[in-house]
Amino acid sequence: MKIVLFTFYYPPDISAGSFRMIALAESLIKKLNNNDELHIITTHPSRYKSHKVIAKDIEINDKIIIHRIKVPNHYNSMFSQAYMYIIYAFSAYKVSKKINPIFIIGSTSRLMTGLLAGFSSWRLGCKYFIDLRDIFSETISDLFLRRSKILGSIFKIMFTFLEKKLLKNASGVNVVSEDFSDYFKKESIDVSNWSFYPNGVDKEFLNSSLSNKTNYKNVKSILYVGNIGSGQGLKTILPAVAKKIGNSYQFLLIGDGRERASLEENIKNNNIDNIKILSPVLRKNLIKHYHDADILFLHLNNLPAFQRVLPSKIFEYIAMGKPIIAGLSGYSANFILENTEYVSVFYPGNVDQCVNSIKKIESLEINKDQIAIFNKKYDRQKIMNEMADHILTKV
């Protein structure tokens, strides 16, 4: 039996999708027979320009065969990223055609990878499964609506049509946020057999709770880890907050993305000296930065699409056992409030609420027992083991 997994990002690339997919792959191979094969068709590391890692074109590890496709460099523009996905899709289909699998899995934080799974399965005469990590039609239309209502509406209609076709024909669909199912139910799609296996806490963070640390520093450090893009909206909130709260707080951002350059320009133009930005680091090095931080920061832009998502970073932050400042609304805000007491949620983009949240956050008590319960419930490997069992019932 040969199974193909399409994922644009896979380790050693650094991204939420790559961490999720390697956990799923490791769970799947434990359940396959000795003669079975799991073919992962991905790209050479390309998530961030500032994080370049060399990887082999083909890598064989037991029953896993990794095929890496070279894609052009991107310049954090939407056009260059779309071009990368097109190059990947054409090459990935050619590879899958040679493999001739009996089942295909598509991980879709971008619609292109999901459509690739659907198209390939149609051409090869096999079933496919979609791991839905984002509602692309809503996200892309929301982002373009701010520039052009006409363009946003066109994208909404076009991508909604493609999304519906993809999901209706899938033998199984998993969502990482329960709110996704509610959204597509309103779009007249039968979601009764859809599954919900969310993101979770990776093994690197399961035993890294830092709640017992007492910090007596005069200058408090606030850490943000992750993508710096339009979805996070950091440039709409952080410069103003940093300026208003003063130098008794130091912000450290670890990440990269399309909005990094404009954020750095904003910081420079406003003479802000309490925000520092570092390029992405490996997870083993990230733990030290978590140790040094006093407060963890999270923010999503104030758009309807982001009210449905459940960022993977939430799981990592809660597991760390440190105070969390979160600019969230909708499903993710409810999830984080239900699962931890050491969080202060403010409305996205609201500078005054954010400042007030920071000033009062350290008065909240950290409950180590609560962290242990959360980690056990959302152990990534446990979730992926269950998801792998579910996927194999669809083969």
Image: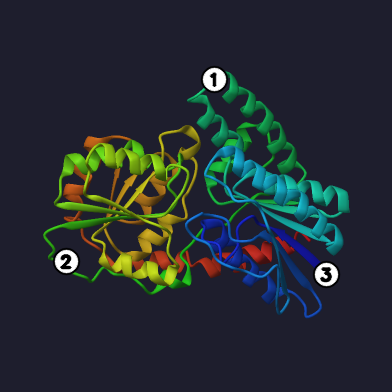
**361 relative position to 144: left or right:** left
Badge 2 marks a residue whose secondary structure is loop
Q: Is residue 192 visible?
A: no
**Amino acid at dot 2:** Asn
Label 2 or label 1, whichever comes before in sequence order:
1
Residue under the image location 50 percent in, 24 percent down: 147
The amino acid type found where label 3 is placed reads: Met
* Residue 215: mark: 2
Residue in the picture at 55% in, 62% down: 13
Residue placed under numbered mark 1 in the picture: 149
Residue shown at the point (80%, 46%) measured from the top left? 119
The residue where tag 3 is placed is 1
Q: Is residue 95 left or right of residue 181?
A: right
Q: Residue at x 38, y 51 (%)?
A: 336
| Residue that extends furthest to the top in the rendered view of this protein | 150
| Marks 3 and 2, the one that precedes in the sequence | 3
- Element under label 1? helix
Measured from the top left, where is residue 126 in percent x and y?
85, 55
Q: Upstream in the sequence, badge 3 or badge 1?
A: 3
**Corner quadrant of residue 64:** bottom right
Tally the marks: 3
- Asked if residue 280 is positioned above or below residue 330 in the image, the reply reads below
Question: Disc 3 and disc 2: Cα gap in Å?
Answer: 54 Å
Q: Amino acid at mark 1?
A: Lys
Give how far apart the Cα atoms at labels 3 and 1 are.
Answer: 48 Å
Q: Position of residue 215 (x, y in %)?
A: 16, 66
User: 231 left or right of 99?
Assistant: left
